[in-house]
Amino acid sequence: ERIVGERVHLTPLFKLLRSDARFFILAITQQSARLFEATRDSIHELSLPPIEHAEPDSNGQAWQLHSHEAPTQGRGERAEAMYHGHDGQADRQQADILNFLHRVDDAVMTVLHDQRAPLTLACVGYLAPMYQSANRYSNLVNVKVPGSPDRWSLDELQRHAWKLVEPYLRKSQQQALEKFERQRGNARTSADIREIVLAANSGRVETIFIEDGARQWGRVEPHLQTVHLCENQQEASEDLCDFAATQTLANGGEVFVLDDALEMDSPLAATLRY
């Protein structure tokens, strides 16, 4: 199907962009952090700001801060046993690791501050609860890829993480649908295409549901707060389903592409912010 319009038509990409298909992986060691965006079939690294980390001086007493940038991919395994010593050095090291993880969280929030997709960890066991205590990201899931992340290739890391995160992704869509059903019929939900299109354009859509492959041709006149429905593409300037979903994504909302048809006379449904 050929679609000609004034902007890029994103409908073919929605299954990749949809909120229940993306997740993030944070691979951490005591002194390094790498952040990845992944889907069921892909993974790529996101750039983190430089992160300071602490290292002991030659006598093992004083700890200095050093700038850390994400290393290139490696397969070598790294020993990560906690240091145990005298005079409170173990407590000091644990405190310094926790301080480092707080700085990792600052860097992660710089990149993911407006995201809502699940974030999972890849780390040795004792680092997970320490990072959880430092974390401020709203959707850190309580599963992790076990062991040092240095032991996995990117493909292995993606496959292991997907198996753990998939149930959370499906749960996210189910919870969004249940919220829509609870609020169905009041002013915070809509299945009216015209209303949803205008709400998405003004940033009022929190979550939008779109039937896979749905089309509704039309024209949008935002300055007049008017949406016209059309019978075919020749009469229209927009696929309104594509327009509403794209505007929802652009304004930080969630988009769920449903394989099953909505149980209503509309290819779109939405939960509104206000």
Image (spheres, helix red, strand yellow):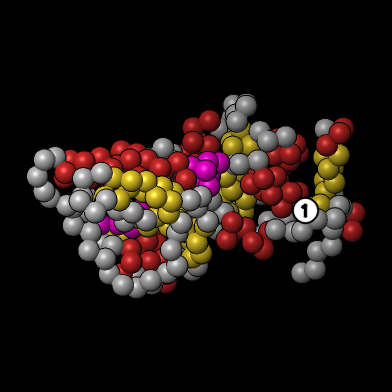
Question: Number of marks in the image?
Answer: 1
Chain part drawn in magenta: 109-124
Residue placed most toward the observer, 130 or 11: 130
Q: Is residue 196 visible?
A: no
Looking at the figure, which quarter contains the N terminus? Answer: bottom right
Residue 138: image location, x then y, percent: 43, 39
Outermost residue, right side: 235
Q: Amino acid at mark 1?
A: Asp
Q: Is residue 122 magenta?
A: yes
Quarter where residue 136 is shown:
top left
**Helix, strand or loop at disc 1?**
strand
> On the image, numbered disc 1 is attached to which residue?
239
**Residue 124 visible in rendering:** yes
Q: Residues within 10 Å of mark 1 (few under 14, many from 20)?
A: many
Q: Is residue 4 magenta?
A: no
User: Which quarter of the rendering shows the C terminus?
Assistant: top right
